[in-house]
Amino acid sequence: MNQKQLRKTTPSVLIFIPILILTILLAGCGIVDTEITVYTNDRYKQDFIITLPADAIDMYGGEEEFENEMRAMMSDELSSEGKFSVKQLKSNDPSVYRYEISQGMTNITTEYNDNFSWTETRFNNRKAYEFRYSRLGSFLSGVSSMTITLHAGKILDTNGTQLDANTVQWTDPWETPYAIVIPKGAATWIPLVALAVLIIAVAVGLYFLITSGKIKQWWQAGTSSGKWRIESLKLGNEIKNAEEQKNLLVTDLGKKAWQNRTEHESYAEHFDQMQAQEQLRAELAEERQSLESQVKDVRQTRDQVENKYNEQIKGLQEQRKTASNQLNQLQESQKGFTKQLESVKKEHLKMQDEWQSFQNKLEQVKASTDPRRDEQIANLNDGIAALSNSMIKANNDIPQLEAQVSQIEEELTPIKNQVEDLENNIEQAKTSQKEEVKPLSEKIESLDKQIAGLKEKERQHQQKLDELVTALGPMVNQARPDSAALNTAYSELDQKQNQLDELNQQQGLLKARISALDSKAVTSFYIFIGASVIVVLLFLVLIYFAFA
């Protein structure tokens, strides 16, 4: 980067160093907020806000002693360097004191070796300035927090936190704060020259137009044209609304004339057409009503047929339900007896096997020489006797159970046949119902289609009649037949026509005034307005590029 060194430093450091030293003496508890704004022509202003604990102020000797010492340091070292003010700020926290030190607009002229440096440089082929604070690390240990905020015309580069295009901030900066900026008020010469040329050209043009009287002529013609055109547009809307209202009144007049059958020779043929349409529509309505009566009768017959079969089917279903319940009960009984029979037979076979086993064991014991032989024989004989009794009982139960199963089977047969017959009867009733209802439904459908066709024809004739009634309005208004029922409508139409005539006269007068204006003057007025807008926009653009 090409740099032209204008090594200039500021007396602000003479404020900053004593304050920091004083802060260090106050146990390193202070907070320092610095606001610096740099301008063109090596000018700047800055403000310090210092926040100190009340305990530290007390240790120093109290609020008054501290403020006297601070003012004494500033008075001794800075009285000739700029304008300064010190004031205590109100604090909502009673445990701290806050002070503001403000320095007015100051030239960067005093040579100094530390801190605020201001160096002319170039950045992206554009003249700029490099801003640096140096050797702050030795002071940061003496404060609990420190911020430096720099305001300029535009921030081009920085190692701080950029808040917006014009502001950068450093918080507790242990490295040297650095920024390349364009100062506030800096402007490039090309936009400024163009701006000056534009202002001169506009001034010369306005002077010529004013002295020649052209602006006055254009203004009168342009404003009059604009005002009359707006009035003409409003009148056009009023005329349109009045014509719509008149047309509604004319249509309403035709309806009233038709309702009251007010005839006149001038529209006799038209009236005959309307009566013919009305007659056709009435005949169609009469035919439709006859068909609707037939449909009503057929529907009633169909409902009666459906209800008759529904009752019949309902009775058969109730009978089937009773027979089915009886059938289910017998089947459950049969199932129980069959299960019991199978159980008895199974137990009988089991007892036979056990009886044979006891017999074989008895033969073996009789042939043995076991000392307990007699006891075992007696026990086996008891077991054989018990099994024999049980087998006899089973032999008696089996025929009885078989007889009960057979009896139930005989009872089931007629009930099954009854259920089957009832189901067949139900299906037959449903089939008969469909056969009788189907032709009735088809007839109803056919009649409905005929009725729909007649309604469509009625609608068409009514539509044609409505069109004829609408067309009747202007004829009645033209003929004005004598009729007490139409007098009020005549009066309303006359009032509306008078209003419309008056509006048309006003519209014609405005058109005549606009035609009488100097068209060249009107055109020049609008060109002048457009050019003025363009000049204002160009002025704003040049201002932006000159000071951005």
Image (cartoon, helix red, strand yellow):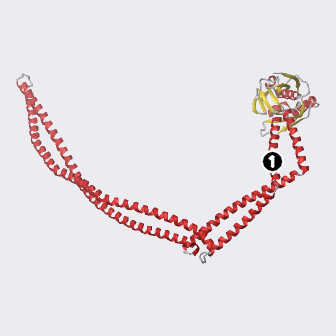
Query: Which residue is rendered at x = 59% and y = 76% of the image?
Result: 485
Q: Is residue 397 above or below residue 153?
A: below
Left or right: 544, with 487 as reference point: right
Residue 148 position, x and y percent, is: 80, 30
Q: Which residue appears farthest toward the right when viewing the image?
A: 80
Does any portion of residue 104 appear in the rendered image?
yes
Q: Nearer the viewer, residue 502 or 76?
A: 502
Residue 36 position, x and y percent, is: 83, 32
Q: Secondary structure at mark 1?
A: helix
Does any portion of residue 31 appear in the rendered image?
no
Which residue bears the numbered disc 1? 527
Q: Is residue 11 above or below residue 443?
A: above
Please state, as top left, top right, bottom left or bottom right, where the N terminus lies in the image.
Answer: top right
Q: Quadrant of the rendered structure where residue 493 is?
A: bottom right
Residue 124 position, x and y percent, is: 79, 26
Q: Quadrant of the rendered structure where residue 23 is?
A: top right
Left or right: 56, with 449 as reference point: right
